[in-house]
Amino acid sequence: MATQQPSSALPAPAPADPYPMAKPGYGKRSTPDQQPRTRNDFTLLPTRERYVAGFVDHLPDGAAMSVKQLAKQLPLYGQQAISTALNALSVAGHLRRVRCSVGAGDETRWVFRTFWSRTARDNEWWSTYLATEKAVQATQAVSPAPARPAPEAPAARQAPEPNPVPPQRAPDQDPAADLPSPAYLALARLGHQDHRLALSADDCAALEARAAEWLGRGVSVDYLTSALTAGLPTTVDHPAGLVRRRLTDKLPPQLPTPTTANTPTRRVLMECTDCGRPGQPENLPDGLCRPCRTAHTAEAPVQPAEVADVKARMANLRDLLKPV
């Protein structure tokens, strides 16, 4: 059995300047009901993972969680090492990346969060929590970034300020934040299903909100694709117009559910911690998709005793979390 070495992990540095906050809809979000912070947190994790976990645990909610930003603050490790450490923390039950749609109609957009738990959680706990209204509200909650005072300029040479343009994406956000939504992907793949419905990037962006409304009513991407490609005329002169008309005319009904009062209107969609591929929590065990999970297992450092200790602890945690 591996001997615990709490002192072997390098202490996470305290940033000299205030840590940058993420843009609205992004950043860290703490989960509820965590154990109090102690000196023994993360002691069973490898040194690098303890170092990263200790730093992330002390960040405030709303802090930027991109690999690029973390690597700037943790100079001992590069972006690749930070990314690998975050994957390991996801497998250990401390972290999940999620997205959730906000708004309605043509104003629908996706927001992204990284949920963090100092207390290691099993897959069942994460799946249950991310299906609750509390998780949806935490995803949509926005923590405004503190305003930075502009440097003073001489009165005689003061230049007019440019018109502010609200950013659509955080410039330091993970590549996962730039992934298209399931509705956009469904529209983009129509041309692969039937060349008569080949849409441009602008067409997909313009029709994305209408397609998202279908998915929001409980239909699958396959159902949406079938409804749009069935019974096409021999020649389609204007694919975008035909798709728009079908999205409007064939919109499925909103079916009421018996558990409406206990079910959130919007469910959090988990993302693979490594590649950002979206999916339901139950389809991404340990927060990783199948290919990334396989790669993570293959690339894991060879530490048999320590890994066995971590697995034993996680198994014990799963047993403790199960209802009596």
Image (tube, rainbow, N blue to C red):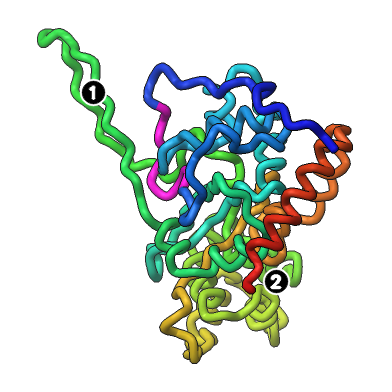
Q: Is residue 128 above or below residue 119?
A: below
Q: Quadrant of the N terminus?
A: top right
Cα gap from disc 2 to disc 1, whole angstroms: 54 Å
Mark 1 residue type: Pro
Residue 188 in sight in this render? no
Q: Could you say which disc has been placed on residue 75 in the image?
A: none
Q: Is residue 90 left or right of residue 315?
A: left
* Residue assigned mark 2: 196
* Residue assigned mark 1: 149
The residue range painted magenta reads: 19-29
Q: Quadrant of residue 145?
A: top left
Q: Position of residue 180 (x, y in %)?
A: 59, 54
| Dot 2 alpha-carbon crowd within 10 angstroms: few under 14, some 14 to 19, many 20 or more | some
Q: Is residue 45 left or right of residue 303?
A: left
Residue 23 is a magenta residue: yes
Mark 2 residue type: Arg
Magenta region, main secondary structure:
loop
Q: Is residue 151 left or right of residue 92?
A: left
| Dot 1 alpha-carbon crowd within 10 angstroms: few under 14, some 14 to 19, many 20 or more | few
Out of 242 and 266, give the one closest to the viewer.
266
